[in-house]
Amino acid sequence: MFSKVLVANRGEISVRVIRTCREMGLKTVAVYSEVDQAALHVRLADEAVKTPGVRGYLDIDFMVAAALKTGAEAIHPGYGFLAENPEFATACREAGLVFIGPEAQAMERMGDKARARESMLAAGVPVTPGTEGVLESEEEALRVARRIGFPVLVKAVAGGGGRGMRLALREGELGAALAAARSEALASFGNPQLYLEKYLSGCRHIEVQILADNYGNAVHLGERECSIQRRNQKLLEESPSPAVDDALREELGRVAVTAAKAVGYQGAGTIEFLLDKNRNFYFMEMNTRIQVEHPVTELVSGLDMVKEQIRIAAGEPLGYSQADIRLSGWAMECRVNAEDPVTFLPSPGQISFCRLPGGFGVRVDTAVFGGETVSPFYDSLIAKVLVHAGTRDQALRRMRRALEEFDVRGVKTTIPFHLRILLHPDFQSGEFDTGFLAEKMTESADDVVSSSEMNPEPELVAVISAALRMYGVNTGEGWVLRKIRPTGRNCSSWRLAGLYERMGGI
């Protein structure tokens, strides 16, 4: 085991990795840009090195040099930035550093979506109908699309996060879809190559977490339901999936482990599937890193995923088999972004006040605090709110309670939008697919209550409470009280008056 780890990332994932390293007795080195010099991950690390500019988190030479300079023996990439860059993994190895992740060859093989499809077909893993390699021309794309039938998805071989992907519902839309996907893929990944897949409607996005060591041992940790997406970006995840029973879970896990072993994978990885209405599933892609939603799996499995990553990278065997994995309860995660809950435009700025939720079964992974500035230069994710409970219904209730407690001011957040999702009858029943948000939830300003309305200033609450108490008005679920507690929970004037008393009156 090494003694010092450089964390080549920022934000909540850096805080997450640093905390596990500290529990394992490992020293940590943070990296930070000029806008992150007061960030929480910098404060928690044992050492910190400044990056060359705001885009320094993408600088491979800087990361390697910083690790060597500070005496770190290993680098953890987190997710995003350099996490799935095989050149970074190779540079670490050539410098004598341990890359906490898979080998570069596995990253290259699975990072190229067209090659990944070929590998999975060879391993007998079910794959969505489409091209067997990279598209060479628009004519080839048209031939394949006619063979498998419209609608089709045009996808970037180096894609991820929904970028470089376009839907063509009919033949006349294919040319424009190819051009748009190619342009976005080149701008986002520096690689314009594309492939084609049959678009399967009414499907769920199910992913399976796997762990594999250097000695041929591999296990899966159950599935995550990731169908609640907006423009291919996940917003809410849960485990287990309400659509997966024990038999299907076992089969999904078996296929996921087969897929990982087929490419000699080592470390933590995720195999992503589409599950159709007839319970047929198809391989989509593999993420060769830790996922944003990995804490969902941690809560139901009891395993620290970052710790397992570090152990595997240090050459330790898993030390357990599939029979030892016990999944318990129901976990759910809401990604809270600094975005307008109606338009979803970024909402950078200074956080004037932040109160995190807590209580039994609640976990918050975040790096924000009151007084911190949410930068426009990076991802808008500010927190992941997670809950764990015995059943899905209990998890839903706990998540609603946690989000109602979460009070962030100074920036707009997506908390109100998450509350709308949780209250939707189709979500509550578990009857949804990847089209849920587009088909079932209109983005109307009249339907979304802003964060400031959901959590008004304490002084405003006190004034309203005093007025209600003074005039003896019991408005029940009246206009004022709906604005203060818009989530469906009963809130009487007596409760507000009690808050007024606790604040010391006027």
Image: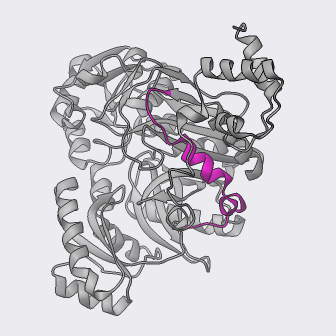
Question: x and y percent of residue 167 in the render?
Answer: 34, 74
Q: Is there any visible trace of residue 328 in the rendered image? A: no
Q: How is the protein colored in the picture?
A: one colour
Is 41 included in the stretch rendered in magenta?
no
- Which residue is drawn at the image coordinates 56% and 76% (left, top)? 276
Instruction: Give the residues drawn in magenta, as a range.
Output: 409-433
Query: Is the residue 444 above or below the residue 306 in the image?
Result: below
Residue 102 placement, left or right of 200: left
Q: Quadrant of the C terminus?
A: top right
- Which residue is drawn at the image coordinates 53% and 72% (left, top)? 203
Question: x and y percent of residue 50 in the render?
Answer: 23, 20
Q: Is there any visible trace of residue 154 in the rendered image? A: yes
Q: Nearer the viewer, residue 31 or 22?
A: 31
Q: Nearer the viewer, residue 415 or 56?
A: 415
Residue 431 placement, left or right of 477: left
Q: Quadrant of the N terminus?
A: top left
Residue farthest to the front, as pictured: 471
Question: x and y percent of residue 72 in the render?
Answer: 30, 22
